[in-house]
Image (tube, rainbow, N blue to C red):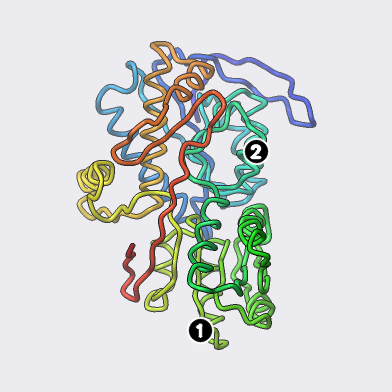
Amino acid sequence: MIQRRTLIRNSVGLGLASLAVPALAQADRKLVLGQSAALSGPASALGEQFRKGAKLQFDAANARGGVGGRTIDFVSLDDGYEPDRCAANTSKLIKDGAFCLFGYIGTPTSLAALPLATAAKLPFFGPFTGAEALRTPFNRYAFHVRASYFDETAEIVKQLTSVGIQRIGVFYQNDSYGKAGLEGVTRALKPLNLEPAGLGTVERNTVDVDAAVKAILEKQPNAIVQISAYKSCAAFIRAARKAGFTGSFYNVSFVGTQALASELGADARGVIVSQVMPFPFSPTTPLTGEYLAAGKAADPKFDPNYSSLEGYVAAKTLLEGLRRAGAAPTQDSLVTGLESLREFNLGGFFVDFSAQKHTGSKFVDMTILTQDGRVRR
């Protein structure tokens, strides 16, 4: 149970329940960061790894005495990647006095939580999603450290069409996440007078992909873009190959690169994944060198991956915003502190916020999986 020192009741309109808005500054020398994430179920690797990377930063900050003498209390609640559970978790975190909401996992869950955070005037920082619906219209309390799904799908379409591939199918999760990715692909194809060659869906947290395989392969695509989580994407890849598909598979970063590689095993060979973080497996930048050293210091068996690096980056950025928020930080001063991060260099990876811009990065890289579970650039 998160300890709460001050309770302010605020009646929230638009059908939202009355929520307890936390004290502007927590007087017990502790800053509570609340997270709702998939820590169980088919998408659990995403939440677990993001949380693990963030904790490297928060634990190190606490070992140094915290931020301005305040320690970080990182509280994570499991939502199983289900929006209703996420909304309930968010209400609880707000009621129990969270200073900031951090590192939510996924589009449908984040969309359920953001209105609650906004009504309570809490910063909603670093969600693990690239959905445009969380970025537009501009929201003073929402901050993103990663590129959008529009950025990722544009790069995927650019790469495919540059080598003459125009018949591009889309396999997508039947929810706000999958539809955001589908919209990104469709937008990128439109200026080329193209449209998706075959569409198929899967329900969230399931692997029932047979109908999607049939629907897409009937249109004879040469490549298939996948907008879903790792278990359903792996199931689709296996089923499509079994049905005779010999083309390319492309995934956006949310799939969970290492989780997908582990799920596929030798079948991962040739699967392409777009990335919104630097390559995490070697110290090619000061940031990744720092991340690898921190991970190995915490656990000699540390297994680096893109999801935990994103948690590490989001936490590092938030901590800098907290440092700039002043000796007695409030939610408003945290927003101001984050908005002062102009072209902020985290060690070869830049985040750029302002009072009018809360999407910090447009960085996109492309990687390919190997049959032995490795990721190559």
**Cα distance, mark 2 to mark 1?**
38 Å
Mark 1 crowd level (few <14, some 14–19, many ≥20, 10 Å Cα): few
Q: Position of residue 310 (x, y in %)?
A: 40, 45
* Picture layout, residue 213 above or below residue 284: below
Q: Position of residue 271 (x, y in %)?
A: 44, 71
Amino acid type, mark 1: Thr
Q: Which of the pair 372/75 is nearer the observer?
A: 372
Q: Position of residue 107 (x, y in %)?
A: 60, 48
- Assign a secondary structure to mark 2: loop
Using the rendered view, name the quadrant where residue 169 is placed: bottom right
For the point 61% across and 38% down, which residue is it? 135
Mark 2 crowd level (few <14, some 14–19, many ≥20, 10 Å Cα): few
**Does residue 189 appear to the left or right of 278 in the view shown?**
right
Using the rendered view, name the quadrant where residue 203 is placed: bottom right
Q: Which of the pair 145/300 is nearer the observer?
A: 145
Q: Which residue is mark 1?
A: 246
Amino acid type, mark 2: Thr
Which image quarter is the C terminus in? Answer: bottom left
Q: Are marks 2 and 1 in contact (CB under 8 Å)?
A: no
Using the rendered view, name the quadrant where residue 324 is placed: top left
Q: Which residue is mark 2?
A: 136
User: Of the residues under marks 2 and 1, which one precedes in the sequence?
Assistant: 2
Q: Which of the pair 336/74 is nearer the observer?
A: 336
**Count of labels in the image:** 2
* Picture layout, residue 288 above or below residue 333: below
For the point 45% across and 63% down, which residue is it? 273
- Residue 145: which disc? none
* Picture layout, residue 254 above or below residue 261: above
**Does residue 239 appear to the left or right of 347 in the view shown?**
right
For the point 59% across and 38% down, which residue is it? 89
- Assign a secondary structure to mark 1: loop
Q: Position of residue 343 (x, y in %)?
A: 39, 31
